[in-house]
Image (tube, grey):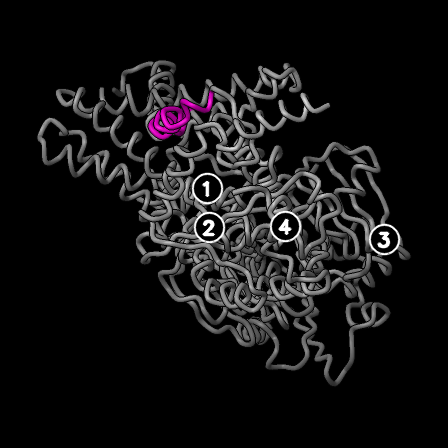
Amino acid sequence: MASTPPRRATGLRHALRRLAEATVTPLAPDDYLDLLAPMRPGGGRARIVSVRPEGPATTLLLRPAGRWPGHRAGQYVRLRVEVDGVRCWRCYSLTGPVAPDGTIAVTVGAVPGGAVSIQLAHRTRPGCLVGLAGPYGEFTLPDELPPKVLFVTGGSGITPVMGMLRTHLDDLPDVVLVHSARSPDQVIFGPELRAWAAAGRLRLLERHTDVEGRLRPEDLPALVPDLAERGTWASGPSGLLDDLTALFETRGWGDHLRTEWFRVATGPVGEGGRIRFTRSRSVVDVDGGTSVLDAGERAGVQLPFGCRMGICFGCVVPLTDGCVRDVRNGALTRASPDDPAVVQTCIQVPAGGCTIDA
Amino acid sequence: MTALQHKPASPIAHLDADQVEELGRELDALREKVIIDRGQRDADYIRRLITAQRHLELGSRAVLLVSLFPPAWIVGTVGLTVAKILENMEIGHNVMHGQWDWMRDPKIRSTAWEWDHASPARLWKHTHNDVHHRYTNVLGQDHDLGYGIMRVDEDQPWSRFHLGQPLWNVINMLLFEYGIAVYDLELGKVVMGRGDRERFRANGRMVLTKVGRQALRDYVIHPLLSGPSVLTTLTANVTANVLRNVWTHSVIMCGHFPSGVETFTKQSIVGETRGEWYLRQMLGSANVSGGRLLHLMTGNLSHQIEHHLFPDLPSNRYQEIAPEVRRIFTRYGLTYTTGSFPRQLASAWWKVLRLSLPPADSAQRRRRRRQAHRAA
């Protein structure tokens, strides 16, 4: 077979694929492969190898199904777990290079009230399978490493930076890390960071916000006098990133700053709001009493519909961002581009804005 | 039965408007209780069932590869029949109702599921979820009342065509998946000149593609894969499909045709309230009593009443809420129509036989009309 010309091999593979499809229709061959070999290459899954506490957070080692394509330090993956029967996707930064045994690591910070992080940190056991997609993200160091680097991080925003440090610290001659956490024991990777600092491999400035208060942007030039000369990578809560962006822009260093921000789909919930229909590129503002279906039709969007009373599921479309409320019982459905849902537009009203893929 | 509105003694005459709305609120509260509790247990149920069904189907088809050996033919045919019934009833029908959309699983989802059946999911969802579940038992609107080929209610007009309906019903039973496919095409509408011909043609192509794929799989590919067992695998697959047809047809006859089920006039649902909608579902459906296996094999359509009240609640919950639903029936003085499978099936068939004949009073009515004419 090795001597078979590649085109014929492709043709044969295509024919076999068509035959497999015709044999298992209306299912797809993948449906049976998922059943028989969930960890097959390309199956989009990973097996949890270990779960260990990492200060206030939890580190998970994952073995991806098949060959991991590799990632750049600072990139993230999407993990899928099931919480109360509901599949949820969340983004987590990879906190180091691929290990010699082929595993990758993520560190899950505790999000107050975050069902997914609780599930991953406390209810996940070695051997469990999770969904895995990625790597993604542009928050990386350039190929030619800058001579002087500043990292500004807050809380679990340290995770992508940890990936960069574990991968590149040997090749970064001058690193300053300004990290904010509520208290010393709330610093994720605290011992490892402090050991590097003690060995003189980086300058670590810890800011403990419980006693010192939040880091203000105007504090930064005093803490890091050569701020202007440093390429800066910042990751953390949106408040911190907004402050830094404003500071760098007023000083004319906008291009020195790269930021990473993980948004959780818990945006403000309101009555009514703006509905964006992505495919038809329509935007409509409605009150809390107008269904997504009525709003879309009024704006001239072609939406599927059926009974218009919530029973037939003929109007189901993807909700890709924001929040909607079920008029029958007030139940909220939230989604984000990384964690989309489907909703019945005839009985859902926007709750503070939403994006519909229709 | 006669439309409830034409009956001399209405079974809902004792309920005033406020009571009907109170009934609606009680049922809404029951639904809400299940929604709040819905979670991992339910997700595990459907995932395990789908996994078991797929293993059963794979295993049965594997056994049929040597179907030349008679015990293999029997085991494989029984296994494949059960797998197909589970796929159509407890899995396909319920997934396509959106009962599992809340899990956010892109495969176990009303918009994504395609079932092992001649009728494409998209067409079936329209005639079933939208038309039948919205207009349950409304004469002239719910075409499931006889599928347009049978008279199953005294208030449906009789024609000579209905004399043959016991035979039509047997044929429909044997070929049920194709019967449903033709029904979902809404052929009648086009024949009457009311349908959109362009859409009918597009839908027709979709049905032919689906029927072709299904037939290619069951009647060509799997038999050929069986090598020397080609003919016996073909007969096994035909048998499994026919047995599935007979079973599903029988289960579905028990849902709305047995005696005790009420029908409604078109005028009666104009401006229908939430409470009235619930009331119509309660009186328009019939259950089948039995054990867990029966409930599973009927796709929990043995809980037709609970299903019609809450078509989007996970099917494993119908059994659990049935006692509470029954208590609500009792409290409001309504009849919860139920019976064993043989009894309900016999009752439905009796109706098909009985109503194939012209109404007993039609001769009388004709005579009276003649007399009135003469008198005038």
Q: Nearer the viewer, residue A123 or A250?
A: A123
Q: Secondary structure at mark 3?
A: loop
Q: Which segment is the magenta one? A: B161-178
Res. B135 image quadrant: top right
How far apart are the alpha carbons under marks 2 and 3? 41 Å
Q: Nearer the viewer, residue A104 or A47?
A: A47
Asked if the residues shown at circle 2 and circle 1 are in contact, with their CB atoms under 8 angstroms apart, the answer is yes
For the point 41% across and 44% down, the residue is B254
How far apart are the alpha carbons under marks 1 and 3? 44 Å
Badge 1 crowding class, 10 Å Cα cut-off, few under 14, some 14 to 19, many 20 or more, is: many
Q: Position of residue A312 (x, y in %)?
A: 60, 43
Of the residues tagged 1 and 4, which is closer to the observer? Answer: 1
Tell me the tag on residue B286. 2
Query: Which residue is identified by label 1?
Result: B257
Q: Position of residue A335 (x, y in %)?
A: 66, 53
Of the residues tagged 4 and 3, which is closer to the observer? Answer: 3
